[in-house]
Image: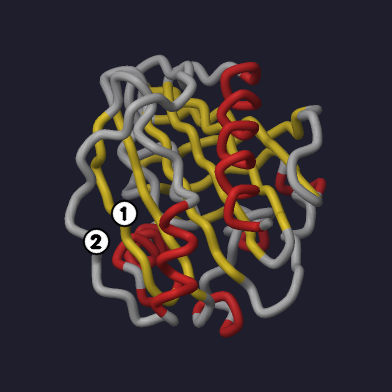
């Protein structure tokens, strides 16, 4: 409840999370039919992270136009249930599926989870190179009503080694309803492709988040050559 949602729709928040380096992929679910150009959607799917050790697939891999993906629709529906004290912070520094260029762009999404945490990844091929703007200062701390529960969010930018052509990382702590969770978020641009990672857990370590981002960027680089 208190973890919020990602560009591609986050897996449910769970316990302590320290992402492992991806190893052998688990058997993926049946892909959703793509409404985006098949070659581009298939190319993005090849760059998705395999399942990290000890984690299982909970969504996807799903490919298609970003705005048409079930994960995106669920994320937007969840966002509509949230009443923010600062509405301008909704989706700040994240991929905005409400923008036509983004909604129509080819994308691939997958989500993994374990008893310790969850990881959601989205890859979106834009018509031209773009990068989400940084989090506005007023969005570093704010409150929201999530399904009747008051939740406070505190976000700080992390000093992450540069990945791709541009990159940015944040750590958000959410507290409310007697629960607390952390959300580590990473956005990387390599060429025209935007990579979004969302790691949810009771405790998200920056070192593990950076390691996962590096692996994800290496995967993306393989299809960007």
Please name the residue shown 48% across and 63% down the image. Answer: 43
Residue 135, visible in the rendered structure? yes
- The residue under label 2 is 31
Q: Nearer the viewer, residue 108 or 43?
A: 43
Q: Are marks 1 and 2 in contact (CB under 8 Å)?
A: yes
Q: Secondary structure at mark 1?
A: strand
Disc 1: CA contacts within 10 A as few (<14), some (14-19) or many (>=20): many
Residue 155 appears at what percent x and percent y? 67, 34
Please name the residue shown 23% across and 46% down the image. Answer: 28
| In the image: residue 81, left or right of residue 188 | left
Indicate the quadrant containing the C terminus: top left, top right, bottom left or bottom right. bottom right
Q: Nearer the viewer, residue 154 or 176?
A: 154
Residue 212 falls in image quadrant: top right
Tell me which label, 1 or 2, sits earlier in the chain. Answer: 2
Residue 222 appears at what percent x and percent y? 60, 49
Q: Nearer the viewer, residue 154 or 24?
A: 24
Residue 205 falls in image quadrant: top right
Q: Vertical placement of 144 versus 171: above or below?
A: below
| In the image: residue 41, left or right of residue 130 | left
Residue 70 falls in image quadrant: bottom left
**Residue 81 — which label?**
none
Please name the residue shown 76% across and 69% down the image. Answer: 129
Disc 2: CA contacts within 10 A as few (<14), some (14-19) or many (>=20): some
Residue 61 appears at what percent x and percent y? 31, 54
Q: Vertical placement of 175 versus 191: above or below?
A: above
Q: How many numbered discs?
A: 2
| In the image: residue 62, left or right of residue 84 | left
Residue 154, visible in the rendered structure? no
Please name the residue shown 53% across and 20% down the image. Answer: 204
Q: Secondary structure at mark 2?
A: loop
- The residue under label 1 is 61
| In the image: residue 173, left or right of residue 8 | right
């Amino acid at each position: 409840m208190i973890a919020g949602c990602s560009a591609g729709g986050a897996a449910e928040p769970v316990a302590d999370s320290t992402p492992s380096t991806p190893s052998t992929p688990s058997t993926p679910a049946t892909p959703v039919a793509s409404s985006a150009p098949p070659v581009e959607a298939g190319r993005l799917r090849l760059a998705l992270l395999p399942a990290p050790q000890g984690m299982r697939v909970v969504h996807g891999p799903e490919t298609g136009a970003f705005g048409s993906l079930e994960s995106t629709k669920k994320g937007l529906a969840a966002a509509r249930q949230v009443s923010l004290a600062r509405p301008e912070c909704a989706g700040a520094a994240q991929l905005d599926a409400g923008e036509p260029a983004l909604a129509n762009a080819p994308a691939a999404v997958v989500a993994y989870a374990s008893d310790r945490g969850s990881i959601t990844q989205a890859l979106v091929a834009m018509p031209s190179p773009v990068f989400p703007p940084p989090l506005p200062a007023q969005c570093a701390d704010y409150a929201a009503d999530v399904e009747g529960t008051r939740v406070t969010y505190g976000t700080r930018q992390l000093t992450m080694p540069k990945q791709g052509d541009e990159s940015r990382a944040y750590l958000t702590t959410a507290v409310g309803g007697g629960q607390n969770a952390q959300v580590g978020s990473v956005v990387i641009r390599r060429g025209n492709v935007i990579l979004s990672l969302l790691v949810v857990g009771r405790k998200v370590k920056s070192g593990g988040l950076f390691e996962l981002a590096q692996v994800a960027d290496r995967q993306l680089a393989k299809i960007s050559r």
